[in-house]
Image (spheres, rainbow, N blue to C red):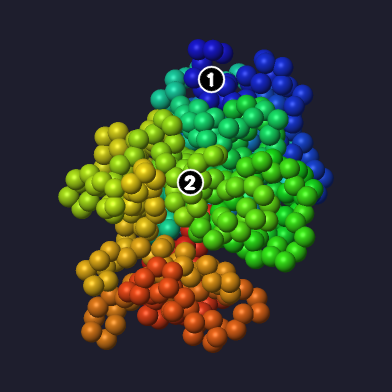
């Protein structure tokens, strides 16, 4: 096993050999509370590998995983890796027409789907000539499908296939915050790379940790939180297959006692709003993590006041698999994305490709071992994103004099006012600092003279008076960040358009602004 670079050999089977077989690897929150030990995971993944071969799904073929966060997910994902088959983690919140595009684009040979999602994806399967096997997890198997139990029945335990770290292991589809999702291909060695860097050297994951990730497994961020990091040390993950609302997050933190909580800024903000003025529930949290969008300074400070634990805000991407720039324990400055994670190099460049120094604003590029090997069937986009060892993030950052990185916005979201670059995120941070504002998004909008100025869309907290808040917000922002940066227009909305991973889709706001 020591010479086998199949990621499943290290993340799964190693724990049995090292005496952690009886340790819980995954435990479901609520419901029946099903549990999967490391020994059971090793055995079940071996059976998945054999069942795939028995179904005629060969090495390097692809299987689509439209699966909720439940114990079958790690069985299927790591079982496929053992067989050299490539699992594709699909967003569980998409529509049938998007699934149709992805399934045809990926040419997946099989689909594994939670029965709760069957009705949604079924129309996307009509006329699909690539999918030969459909496996339904839970409930009755509809006509033309096989149940997961039947698929596994009689399967023997197959060992992890011998392969090298540079072989493709799995695919993710980008979240589509700026358009149609793209198939991102990752190799076996990338999983270990994120565990050895962020997992070990920033998060400091420990064997006695219990992890709950509100971000789902289909999200690159959630895959690392819920599987890669805890499984790198033999820790336990709490799985929840429903929507991670503030009520759910608080109940899991209280009832299941995770020591590590991984969320996104939207959830942190909503949970803070829920708990303001209320008693803090009991918890064993030692560290919290945020990614997906930059965390507003105000939310970080208020979360710490409530729970007495810090949030490690960082930035990652589907293309880099997990976080490569982050705040760290003992080195936290809210409102910044921190410093490069050990093992990664980052730099900021201007429009000509010249590197910028402290104080300037430029696009962030990153280099590290977890980088994807490219997009599927999108050579032009691969060449424009992956430049040798460097990956373009599409994010604009400013570097401070002490080497911290401050998020300014997506490259497409930045705009100039009076010839000076404006960071939408800086204005958004100022807006959410107002006690009545829950969320905010800022885009460029042209005035009567055709000049670009900031326009804000805000979501108010329950009970807030919209007229009173909007009347005072402009002066509030002027006082916090400067008179020329304030939003000239403010629209109160019920919610902001987001991807399933919590990223605000500002391009949609620009279309309706």
**Image point (54%, 87%), residue name:** 467
Residue 9 x %, y %: 57, 21
Q: Is residue 49 above or below residue 138?
A: above
Query: In the image, what residue occupies the spot 54% across and 45% down?
Result: 312
- Which quadrant of the figure contains the N terminus? top right
Q: Which mark is residue 423?
A: none
Q: Name the residue under label 1.
A: 161
Q: Is residue 400 above or below residue 14?
A: below
Q: Is mark 2 on a helix, strand or loop?
A: strand
Horizontal and vertical percent position of residue 35: 77, 36
Residue that badge 2 annotates: 314
Q: Given this view, does label 1 or label 2 mark the residue nearer the observer?
A: 2
Number of callouts in the render?
A: 2
How dense is the environment of label 1, judged by Cα within 10 Å: few (below 14), some, or many (20 and up)? Answer: some
Task: Please tell me which of labels 1 and 2 falls first in the chain.
Answer: 1
- Which is nearer the eye, 391 or 128? 391
Residue 71 seen anywhere in this rendered image of the structure: no
Residue 265 appearing in the image: yes
Q: Position of residue 69 (x, y in %)?
A: 65, 46
Instruction: Tell me the element at label 1.
Output: loop
Asked whether the residues under the numbered discs 1 and 2 touch, taking CB atoms below 8 Å apart as contact, a structural biologist would say no
């Amino acid at each position: 096993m020591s010479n086998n670079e199949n990621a499943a050999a290290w993340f799964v089977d190693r724990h049995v050999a090292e005496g952690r077989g009886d340790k819980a690897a995954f435990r479901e929150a609520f419901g029946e509370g099903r549990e999967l030990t490391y020994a059971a995971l090793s055995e079940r993944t071996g059976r998945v590998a054999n069942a795939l071969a028995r179904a005629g799904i060969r090495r390097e073929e692809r299987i689509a995983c439209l699966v909720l966060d439940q114990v079958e997910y790690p069985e299927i994902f790591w079982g496929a890796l053992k067989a050299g088959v490539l699992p594709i983690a699909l967003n569980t919140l998409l529509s049938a027409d998007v699934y149709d595009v992805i399934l045809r684009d990926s040419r997946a040979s099989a689909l594994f789907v939670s029965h709760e999602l069957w009705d949604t994806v079924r129309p996307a399967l009509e006329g699909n000539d690539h999918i030969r096997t459909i496996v339904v997890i839970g409930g009755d198997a509809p006509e033309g499908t096989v149940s997961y139990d039947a698929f596994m029945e009689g399967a023997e335990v197959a060992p992890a296939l011998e392969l090298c770290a540079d072989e493709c292991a799995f695919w993710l589809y980008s979240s589509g915050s700026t358009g149609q999702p793209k198939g991102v291909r990752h190799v076996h060695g990338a999983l270990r790379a994120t565990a050895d860097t962020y997992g070990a050297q920033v998060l400091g994951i420990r064997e006695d940790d219990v992890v709950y990730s509100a971000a789902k497994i289909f999200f690159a961020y959630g895959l690392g939180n819920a599987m890669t990091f805890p499984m790198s040390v033999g820790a336990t993950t709490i799985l929840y297959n429903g929507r991670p609302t503030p009520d759910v997050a608080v109940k899991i933190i209280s009832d299941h006692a995770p020591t590590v909580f991984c969320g996104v800024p939207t959830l942190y903000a909503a949970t803070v709003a829920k708990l303001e003025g209320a008693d803090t529930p009991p918890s064993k949290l030692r560290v919290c993590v945020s990614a997906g969008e930059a965390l507003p300074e105000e939310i970080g400070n208020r979360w710490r006041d409530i729970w007495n634990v810090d949030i490690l805000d960082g930035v990652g991407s589907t293309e880099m698999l997990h976080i490569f720039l982050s705040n760290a324990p003992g080195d936290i400055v809210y409102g910044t994305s921190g410093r490069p994670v050990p093992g990664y190099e980052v730099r900021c460049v201007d429009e000509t490709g010249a590197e910028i120094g402290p104080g300037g604003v430029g696009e962030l590029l990153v280099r590290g071992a977890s980088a994807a090997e490219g997009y599927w069937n999108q050579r032009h986009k691969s060449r424009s994103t992956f430049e040798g060892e460097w990956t373009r993030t599409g994010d604009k950052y400013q570097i401070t004099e002490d080497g911290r990185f401050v998020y300014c916005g997506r490259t497409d979201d930045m705009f100039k006012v009076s010839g000076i670059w404006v960071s939408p995120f800086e204005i958004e941070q100022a807006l959410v600092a107002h006690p009545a504002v829950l969320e905010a998004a800022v885009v460029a909008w042209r005035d009567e003279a055709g000049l670009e100025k900031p326009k804000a869309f805000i979501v108010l907290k329950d009970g807030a008076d919209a007229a009173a808040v909007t009347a005072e917000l402009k002066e509030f922002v002027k006082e916090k960040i400067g008179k020329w940066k304030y939003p000239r227009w403010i629209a109160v909305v019920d919610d902001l358009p987001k991807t399933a991973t919590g990223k605000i889709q500002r391009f949609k706001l620009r279309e309706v602004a």
